[in-house]
Image: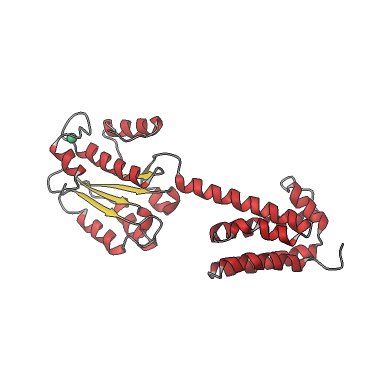
Amino acid sequence: MNFGKLQLNDEVKKRISSAVDSGTLSHAILLTGGTEKERKELSVLLSQALLCENHEKPCLKCDTCKKIKSGNHPDIILTEGEAGKQKSIKIDTIRSIRSRAFIVPNEAPYQIFIILEASGMGEEAQNALLKILEEPPATARFILASRSRDDFRQTILSRVTPFAISEDSGRAAGEKENTKASKAAEEIFSALMTKNEARILLGSAALEKDKKTFKACIEKMILMLRNSIIAKYKDEENITLTENKFSAKFTEKEIINMMGILKELLSDADKNANDNLLVTRLTIGLMSCIESDRS
Ligand SMILES: [Zn+2]
């Protein structure tokens, strides 16, 4: 397989090449990771490799390769969603792909349906696509591209052969969020133990204007509170040092009240309450749980 100017890691190249060269490329491929541009370029290259008239595929010189490159091949059907914007790919678009897939190709051995930024499919659109992926006509091939595997339902994933262009950028972003959330949770916990209101506000500053991380942080704290209660009764290995300290510092009632505040905030965050206000409420709410007669 000729990758032209596209830079990919050797392992991915090897996997794709061996599938293309042996003619065993599956009828449905999922490209993830990399940039939007890289995913698009690879979809075009793969389509060329599938339909190229020459031996060294894709030659990038034959009529077919050129037509595909210029977007003028009648058997390449391109659909483009908007990254992360669910329903930017309409269910009707997927339905028309489904009916078109049963039509005989114009000039190539098969039609190739490329769906870029396929995260634009909502649940209904994914279900509609699933039907054709499950029983595809012999003359249809599918190339889906998206930031992350996490953009798809498990049923779709089980029908496609995945190729990760590089590190799964969606996952990487998710992990980054998680680290940020855990860090903030730790910071808020130690600030609570010193009853330092200003430090709680500071610790939660990272959560402002980032509702996903805010929610991840609250969920993390609820878990930590639960462990702090358990620590009062049992010596468990998976309880962290912070949780043990927290458990020693506060009464069960205080911790339970804190959990109540956090659960309420979590449900309000889902209702799209104002982000900045949520962070303030977090600070005031947690502080109010600490009984005043304690030193
Ligand atoms: Zn060619």
**Residue 198 image position (x, y, % from top left):** 72, 60
Residue at the (54%, 67%) spot, across then down: 270
Left-right relation of 211 to 50 = right
Quarter of the rendering containing residue 281? bottom right
Residue at the (12%, 45%) spot, across then down: 107
Q: Quadrant of the N terminus?
A: top left
Q: How many marks?
A: 0
Left-right relation of 102 to 202 = left
Residue at the (62%, 58%) spot, across then down: 205
> Residue 168, relative to residue 60: is it above or below?
below
**Residue 152 image position (x, y, % from top left):** 41, 53
In this orientation, does residue 140 appear? Answer: yes
In this orientation, does residue 22 appear? Answer: no
Q: Where does ligand 1 appear, by image quarter?
A: top left
Quarter of the rendering containing residue 200? bottom right
Q: How is the image coloured?
A: secondary structure
**Residue 64 image position (x, y, % from top left):** 15, 40
Q: Nearer the viewer, residue 222 or 66?
A: 66
Q: Quadrant of the C terminus?
A: bottom right
Q: Nearer the viewer, residue 209 or 110?
A: 209
Quarter of the rendering containing residue 126? bottom left
**Residue 197 image position (x, y, % from top left):** 74, 62
> Residue 222, relative to residue 161: is it above or below?
below
Left-right relation of 256 to 38 = right
> Residue 64, relative to residue 95: is it above or below?
above
